[in-house]
Amino acid sequence: MGIRDQRKAETSRKIQAAALDIVEELGLEATTVARIAQQVGISDRTFFRYFDSKESAIVPGQGELVTALVELEIAKGTTASSIFQSLLQVCREHFSAEIEQHEFRRVTRLMLTDPKLLLIATRREQELVVELSQSLIARGLATPMQALLISEIVASTWRVAWQCFTQAEKAGTTAVPSEFFERAVAEMLQIFDMGPSGS
């Protein structure tokens, strides 16, 4: 990572930290882009170079995941199963990056206390499904139904892993999100091994 990328990443982290500080102190409704920018010492315009809303600053990981999934290079003719596995690998790598780069435990705690943040995460998950399925269709990689199924299952696996992680955090268990992701993938693959007839 070059110096410019390091500075950009650092500014991004400062914006998220400021957003979380304000949410913790004043609540989600009182948190504004102007307040976040002021706390970081940047203009509103600079804020929007990094995030498209206060919500994306509070929960940045999902936006980054969408970008990573949509921009994944996949060769034409790749099977739906292989596409799905490749997308799961992107999620796997993203979990690891999220642990290192974002204040995921802090975000999780806030989601437990403010249901509106959970709604934000759910809305962003739906954006993931729409953007990913449209990307797969536009690139001729999957039929509309396949694209939607793949996108929904990827998003569901991501959500289930985070929900289980959040429940573990709430119970006071020290947990690592990536472990929950691996368990979610393993459980999901076991279900699919049942086959179409359920046997």
Image (cartoon, helix red, strand yellow):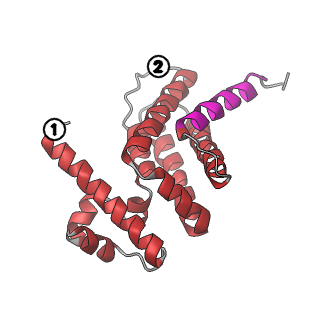
Q: Are marks 1 and 2 in contact (CB under 8 Å)?
A: no
Quadrant of residue 93 within the rendered picture: top left
Amino acid type assigned to the residue bearing label 2 in the image: Gly
One can see residue 77 in this view: yes
Q: Viewed as shown, does residue 127 lie left or right of 197?
A: left
Disc nearer the start of the sequence (1/2): 1
Q: Main secondary structure of the magenta part?
A: helix
Q: Viewed as shown, does residue 131 lie left or right of 80?
A: left
Image coordinates of residue 142 in percent, x first then y, are: 52, 31
Image coordinates of residue 110 in percent, x first then y, are: 53, 63
Nearer the observer, 151 or 176 = 176
Quadrant of residue 46 within the rendered picture: bottom left
At numbered mark 2, what does the secondary structure look like: helix, strand or loop? loop
One can see residue 52 in this view: no
Image coordinates of residue 167 in percent, x first then y, are: 66, 51
Quadrant for the C terminus, please.
top right
Q: Is residue 64 above or below residue 179?
A: below
Residue at image x 26%, y 49%?
9
Q: Residue furthest left?
A: 3
Q: Is residue 124 above or below residue 20?
A: above
Q: Is residue 134 magenta?
A: no
| Image mark count | 2
Q: Identify the residue under disc 2.
A: 77
Quadrant for the N terminus, please.
top left
| Magenta residues, start to end | 178-194
Q: Is residue 16 above or below residue 92?
A: below
Residue at image x 57%, y 57%?
122
In front: label 1 or label 2: 1
Q: Viewed as shown, does residue 2 lie left or right of 92?
A: left
Q: Identify the residue under disc 1.
A: 2
Q: Badge 2 local density, few (<14 within 10 Å), some, or many (20+)?
A: few
Amino acid type assigned to the residue bearing label 1 in the image: Gly
